[in-house]
Amino acid sequence: MAKEYSVDRQVFDEVMVPCYAPMQMIPVKGQGARVWDQDGREYIDFAGGIAVSCLGHCHPVMVDALKAQAEKIWHLSNVMTNEPALRLAKLLTEHSFAEKVFFANSGAEANEAALKLARRYAADKYGPEKSEIISFKQGFHGRTFFTVTVGGQEAYSDGFGPKPGAVTHLAYNDLASLAEHMSERTCAIMMEPLQGEGGIVSPTPEFVQGVRELCNKHNALLIFDEVQTGNGRTGDFYAYQGLGVTPDILSTAKSLGGGFPIGAMLTTTELAAHLKVGTHGSTYGGNPLACAVAEAVVSEVTKPEVLAGVRQREQWFREALATINAKYPVFAEIRGKGLLLGAALNEEWQGRARDILVAAGEEGLMVLVAGANVVRFTPSLVIDKADIDEGMARLERAIAKIYS
Ligand SMILES: *Cc1c(COP(=O)(O)O)cnc(C)c1O
């Protein structure tokens, strides 16, 4: 038998690549919106594994789907298709504009497929000159070299040698600069329909509508990166459905698997035809276990009562945060939509989002930040009212402690 190591946080520093700085505690068990660490300490989870655990931890529909599939077949590769992948693709097309689906294992991979499809389509249809990808400052699209280059933070893409070319970054919500810049060379615009990592920034209605019109005018494709906003997070199944603007390509991941790794690129039949046999692929993409879990997740999240519940929970979050802010004024505004919310710090509290995250952790509450000035909340979409109340009580205690 293999030796079993007893492990603690120090082992991370010994044997893991130091590109992360994880918290001290190590969670070992989760149920719903609660998590327990190695010492048995309990936490309320307002982070949801960064907008992933959309049904909370170990939801029975996910556990059942995983167990059932685990006893049937785990892996085939794309030399064959499989039933869970086909059923999931059907579901995704039923609940979106899309007619065709490509499965990957992560958000970055779904975006990589989206960008490659856009480039291939433009090259096939208009020629090699039409290659420019426009994206937005503070945007985030993943960590593969193409997607991180398209992302709007150079700090993430610098230092790795020559970058993929023909990528332009413009200011989000600045329609005039986009209109001025776009040309017949523009192949696609990639954007988040609500910037997540960049600080929870919603697009103005004029901006998203304007982007769509400019794409139409210049024969450019519109790619919505819905990796964070998708799968019910904003109260619509996809955020585009609440904006009244339909993209040509959409990427989804994070909540899609509810905690099991999977990503997908959605598009139309016309565009999909340009990824002919052999042009793109993934060994694990469309894996039966991942697709079985995602099928259960999507079936649950698309229920009208679950989506309506997200909007109800948004109200509870906003009210509780306003109550805390009335006692301890630290927030300037609450931004975002559904359960993708950001509490932006006021003038006096600039730069202290991480202090609040650490203080919350000490009180038994997991939250996130989005930059130095925004405390971010991306909890389970089905979190109970009682867990929200308890979490907010812990957040209030945390803020009270550092408020002076
Ligand atoms: C998290 C995220 C990604 C990257 O997803 P991974 O699964 O980490 O590759 C891409 N785009 C957006 C908007 C995200 O929030």
Image (tube, rainbow, N blue to C red):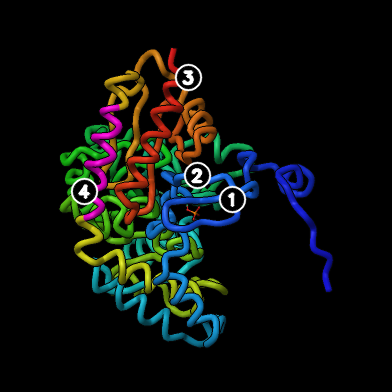
Q: Earlier in the sequence, mark 1 or mark 3?
A: 1
> Can the viewer see residue 267?
yes
Residue 183 image position (x, y, % from top left): 28, 45
Q: Residue at x 27, y 33 (%)?
A: 177
Please state which amino acid type lies under the numbered disc 3.
Ile
CB atoms of marks 1 and 2 within 8 Å: yes
Displayed quadrant of residue 128: bottom left
Please state which amino acid type lies under the numbered disc 1.
Pro
Residue 402 is labelled as 3
Which span of residues is magenta-colored? 309-323
Q: Earlier in the sequence, mark 2 or mark 4?
A: 2
Mark 2 → mark 4, Cα distance in angstroms: 23 Å
Query: Residue under circle 2?
Result: 43
SS at badge 4: helix
Q: Earlier in the sequence, mark 4 or mark 3?
A: 4
Mark 2 → mark 3, Cα distance in angstroms: 19 Å
